[in-house]
Image (cartoon, rainbow, N blue to C red):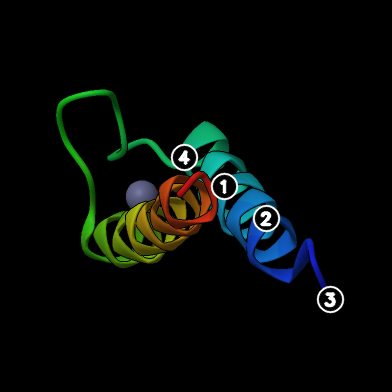
Amino acid sequence: MADDLYQRYMEAAAVYRHHASGCDSCSQSDRCFHGERLHKAFAKRQDDYSTRLSAKRR
Ligand SMILES: [Zn+2]
């Protein structure tokens, strides 16, 4: 369970990257509706993960 957050973070990153690599509308600066949703989910998990990392350091 220790790496649950990390695993979901990696999973969301992979899902987003997979979408972006096959999507003509998604680039570094622009995202389609679906890509935007995937990227938000990825960003949130990245956030959760780094929050946990810094909380652990105390
Ligand atoms: Zn897209």
Residue type pointed to by label 3: Met
For the residues bearing labels 2 and 3, Cβ distance under 8 angstroms: no
Q: Which residue is mark 1?
A: 13
Quadrant containing the N terminus in the rendered view: bottom right
Specify the farthest residue to the bottom: 1
Residue type pointed to by label 1: Ala
Check disc 3 and report its element: helix, strand or loop: loop
**Callout in the foreground (3, 1):** 3
Measuring from the top left, give residue 24's x and y in whole percent.
Answer: 37, 35
Left or right? Give the position of 58 relative to 29.
Answer: right
**Callout in the foreground (3, 4):** 3
Measuring from the top left, give residue 8's x and y in whole percent.
Answer: 66, 65
Check disc 4 and report its element: helix, strand or loop: helix
Q: Which tag, 4 or 1, sits closer to the chain's start?
A: 1
Question: Does any atom of ligand 1 lie closer than 8 Å to the CB of label 4?
Answer: yes
Question: Does any atom of ligand 1 lie closer than 8 Å to the CB of label 3?
Answer: no
Q: CA distance from mark 2 to mark 4?
A: 21 Å
